[in-house]
Amino acid sequence: MVAGKELKKMSEPIDFYFDFSSPYGFIAAMQIERVAARANRTVRWRPFLLGAVFKKVGQSPLEHDLKREYINKLDVFRSARMRGLVIKTPRGWPEHSIPPARIFYWIEPRDPAEAARYAHAAYTAYWIDGNSTADADIAVDVAARLGLDRAQAAAAIQAPAIKQRLVEENEAVIARGVFGSPFIFVDGEPFWGSDRLDQVAIRLEKGSV
Amino acid sequence: MVAGKELKKMSEPIDFYFDFSSPYGFIAAMQIERVAARANRTVRWRPFLLGAVFKKVGQSPLEHDLKREYINKLDVFRSARMRGLVIKTPRGWPEHSIPPARIFYWIEPRDPAEAARYAHAAYTAYWIDGNSTADADIAVDVAARLGLDRAQAAAAIQAPAIKQRLVEENEAVIARGVFGSPFIFVDGEPFWGSDRLDQVAIRLEKGSV
C-alpha cells in the first residue's frame, strides 16, 4: 500500500509555472525537461501572468532602480550565458504575455505535449529572436510553424472560454503561493528561480535538498 | 605599459560586502576565500549594515510575506545544505549587526587578514552556533577567542572614531550601488548573492561570464 503510494508519488509530474515575459522563466524552460527526464519525471507546463500575481502581492520584485538595472542589464545576460544561451530582449519588453498564454491553454486540453512544444517555441521566439510577447501575430506564427491552424490559433486568443481558463490559472497560481517566475513544485515543494534548478535536480534524485 | 596595468588589475582584491545578519552573506563568506585563492586573488572584506541600505533604497527585498516565508523557511536552509552547511538561525534574528561590524573595523586598519579571520569566526558564531548578531558580549567573545584583548574589543564598539568609520562604510556601500548582501565586485563588476559565486569564479578565470 505504502509502496504503491510511493511509486505513484515518484511518477508525479513537476509543476513548472512561468510567464513568457520572464527571462529567468526562459532560462529554466530551456532546461526543465532535461532535469525532469533524468529523474523519469514529466513536466506540467503552466504559463501565467506575473502582472496578476504582482497585483495580488503588492509589487514587483524589481522594487527599485538599482536592482532593476542590475537584473535587467547584467544578471539576466550572465545567467543565460552560463547556460549557453544568448538572450535578445523582446521588443517592447516588459509587456504582458497574454497571446501565447491563451494559445497554450487552447492547445493544452487536447495535447499537453504539443502545448509544451508550443511553450518552448514561443519562448525561443521571444528571448532568442527578440519578438514582442504582447504581439498576437507573433504568438499565432509560432503555432503555425508547429503545424497548428493559424485561424484557429488567432481565434483562441479571443475565445471567452480560453480567456476564462487563463483567469482561473492565474487564480490557482496565486492560491498556491507562487510569487515569481519560474516557480517549480516537486511533490509540493516550491523552488523559485532558474538558479534553483540544481536544487530541483538534487530534490528529484535524493528526495531532499 | 598596458601589460603592467593588466598585471596590476589581475592582482586587485575582490571586494566582498556583507552584513553579519545576512544568511546568504554567511554562505558566501564560507567560500569566498577559496574562490579568490584559485585565481590568485585576495578578498577585501567589507561588513556593512543592510538596514542603512534598505532605508536608502526604500525597502527590504523581503517585501511580502510569501517571499519572506519562502526565503527564511526554505531557501536559506536548502542553499546552505547545498554547500555542506547546517544553518542555525541567530537568536533574535533579524537584528542589527553593529557590534561585530564595529569590532571588524577596529581590527582592520592594523591587520586586514586578522579582520577577515574575525569576520569568519563571527559568522560562525551567528549562523552555525545561533548567537544574536546584536549582542555585544558575543561579538567581544569572538574577538577574545582569536587572542584579541577583550576590554579593547568591548571599548571599540563604543569608540566614536569606529562608529564614524562604520557610518562612512555604509555611505560608501550605498554610493557604490550595493543593494543586498552579499555583494561582490570583481574588477568593478558587481555580483549579488551567494548563488552567483559560480559566476564570480568564471569571471575570475576567464575575464567575463
Image (cartoon, coloured by chain):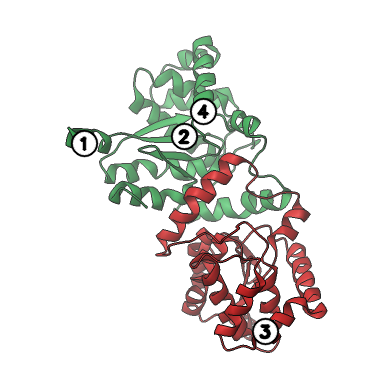
Chain colours: A green, B red
Nearer the N terminus, badge 1 or badge 4?
1
Element at label 3 = helix
The residue singled out by tag 2 in the image is A17
> Which marked residue is nearer to the observer: mark 2 or mark 1?
1
What chain is tagged by disc 2?
A
The residue singled out by tag 1 in the image is A7
* Crowd rating for badge 4 (residues with CA inside 10 Å; few <14, some 14–19, many 20+): few
The percent position of residue A64, horizontal first and vertical second, equals 72, 47
Query: Residue A45 sits in which quadrant?
Result: top left
Amino acid type at mark 1: Leu
Amino acid type at mark 3: Ile
Element at label 1 = helix
Nearer the N terminus, badge 2 or badge 1?
1
Q: CA distance from mark 2 to mark 1?
A: 24 Å
Amino acid type at mark 2: Tyr
Tag of residue A175: 4
